[in-house]
Image: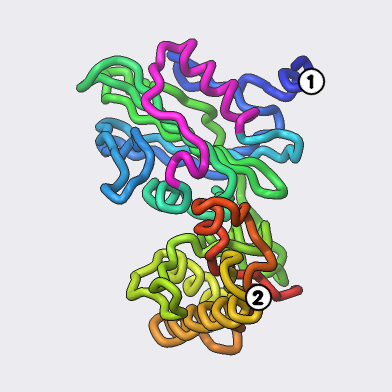
Amino acid sequence: MRGLAALFCVLPMVVPAATLELPASAKLQSAETTPLSSYDVAVGGWSFAGLPKIEALGTVDRQVWRIDSAGLTTLQILAPLRQQLQSAGFSLLYDCRTDACGGFDFRFGLDVAPPPAMQVNLGDFRYLAARRGADPAAEYVTLFISKTARAGFVQVVTVGAETATDERPIIVATAAPPAIEQPADAAPAPTSAFGSVLEASGHVILSDLKFESGSAQLGAGPFDTLAELAGYLIAHPARKVALVGHTDSSGSLEANVALSRHRAASVVERLVADYGVPRAQLEAQGMGYLAPVASNLSAQGRDANRRVEVILTSTD
């Protein structure tokens, strides 16, 4: 506990209303302030009915921080911030992690700063919303935290009612964001959170794809993951990916390999025909039931195993 506490330092604030502590290695990546504005605060998990939100009115401050520490988990980053907010008089409105939030759909229902400032791992993120006071003078804070293989990322959004002194409910720091310089020969940065996750982990499950039962025919869509993947590939013409189909363990291996390959090929055709992705950047493969992500002994596990993944095959 002492070692973890030693990682934290108090960052400067504008007014003495409250302060947040971030790890000492935190570096400001971006900051913006929009007066007389509004921000949709998510207060529940995503469902087919949509994402429950509250419209918060006032001055909107958003800051994004990068934490260069491979040892910190998203919970270790979030827990001290949650405690500080509660100590400052904020009440929690909603608090969730990855799948409990709604996974991919929840993340893309939020207003999240784009990369390279904010990078989101779709398999490891946490969210918190809190409020202090009552409308119309209520103050809102949202935290969105994710962890890639290299660093942790924290987006802090605060919304406060306008006052004569123009105070903010929480100001993490006031320093201008540092310039992000890229070498002249560096590869272009990912254009989306999807691309950031793909480059960080090497693969992404296209979790929103729907196939007709027992068929290789991809549903009508639209599918957000295909739009994200297409945007990434078109922006990075040197990148190549393999679409890999997977099945549950029902049936023979030979039949499942064929079905999974045909489903992956259906995804390739959709990317080419509807999104204009060059075919040279794509290939289709099938693994059948040889690479499960869950047990085939339950209906939930079998459903998780029926999937198509995109795997980054470029080596430079």
The residue singled out by tag 1 in the image is 3
Coordinates of residue 97 in the picture (x, y in percent): 51, 37
Residue 57 in the figure: left or right of residue 174: left
Which of pointers 2 and 1 indicates the residue nearer the eye?
2
Tell me the quadrant of the picture where the C terminus can be found.
Answer: bottom right
- Distance (Cα) linking label 2 and label 1: 50 Å
Q: Is residue 173 above or below residue 15?
A: below
SS type, badge 1: helix
| 81 is within the stretch colored magenta | yes
Q: Which residue is at 43% across, 45% downward?
A: 102
- The front one of 166 and 146 is 146
The residue singled out by tag 2 in the image is 253
| Residue 16 visible to an observer of this rendering | no
**Residue 244 location, quadrant:** bottom right
Q: Which residue is at 68% across, 22% downward?
A: 8
Q: Is residue 201 above or below residue 267?
A: above
Q: Residues within 10 Å of mark 2 (few under 14, many from 20)?
A: some
Nearer-N-terminus badge (2/1): 1
Residue extending furthest toward the right = 3
- Number of numbered discs on residues: 2
Residue 46 in the figure: left or right of residue 177: left
SS type, badge 2: helix
Q: Is residue 177 above or below residue 237?
A: above
Residue type of the residue flagged with mark 1: Gly
**Residue 202 location, quadrant:** bottom right
Coordinates of residue 213 in the picture (x, y in percent): 41, 71
In this figure, which colouring scheme has been used for the structure? rainbow
Per the picture, the main secondary structure of the magenta-coloured stretch is helix
- The front one of 96 and 251 is 251
Q: Is residue 109 above or below residue 9?
A: below
Which stretch appears magenta? Answer: 75-102
Tell me the quadrant of the picture where the N terminus can be found.
Answer: top right
